[in-house]
Image: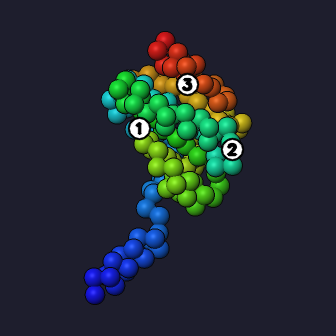
Amino acid sequence: MKKYVLILLLLRFFISPSHAEVKYIDESGLNKLLHQGYNKTVLVFWATYCPYCKALLQTLNENSIYFKRNKINIIAISVDKNPSLVTDFVEKVKYPFNFYIDRGDLKRKFNAYYIPVTAIFDKDGRLEDTFPGNKPFSELKSYLEE
């Protein structure tokens, strides 16, 4: 009997749907996130089809202790049209920061037509810098420490 219960639990685990929660975000939602008491916020526009974006997200993940120690919030906003691609990616990588899907207005506001695009905000939610491409961590760190 114990074997059957164990098998059922294992099947449920492997068959259960993804639990990654990826929400849509607009400008007002971003403004709320920028005023949560962090020293800085790093905002990254990315897409599941972009290898440079994935490399940048991996770099952010690998340096998550630095961001946490320095009270730096990481926000990753996807410009993908298919939300299930984003959810699948987020569930697979399990990075320690929040993922969102752009409703369209943020991509236009930050001119994020060629991704990745990174924006850095100060503790008051003011935009400090925006730059395209996948920068090495050392370069990103120098932007954050200016």
Is residue 29 among what the camera can see?
Answer: no
Residue assigned mark 1: 33
Which label is found at residue 50? 2
The residue type indicated by label 3 comes to Phe
Q: Position of residue 29 (x, y in %)?
A: 45, 43
Whether residue 94 is situated above or below residue 13 in the rendered picture: above
- Nearer mark to the viewer, of 2 and 1: 2
Which of label 3 and label 1 is nearer to you? 3
Mark nearest the camera among 3 and 2 is 3
Labelled pair 3, 2 in contact (Cβ < 8 Å): no
What whole-number distance in Å separates the C-alpha atoms at marks 2 and 1?
25 Å
Q: Quadrant of the N terminus?
A: bottom left
Disc marking residue 104: none
- Residue that protrudes farthest toward the right in the picture: 114
Measuring 72% from the left and 36% from the top, which residue is drawn there? Answer: 114
Secondary structure at badge 2 equals loop
What residue is disc 3 on?
137
Report helix, strand or loop for mark 1.
helix
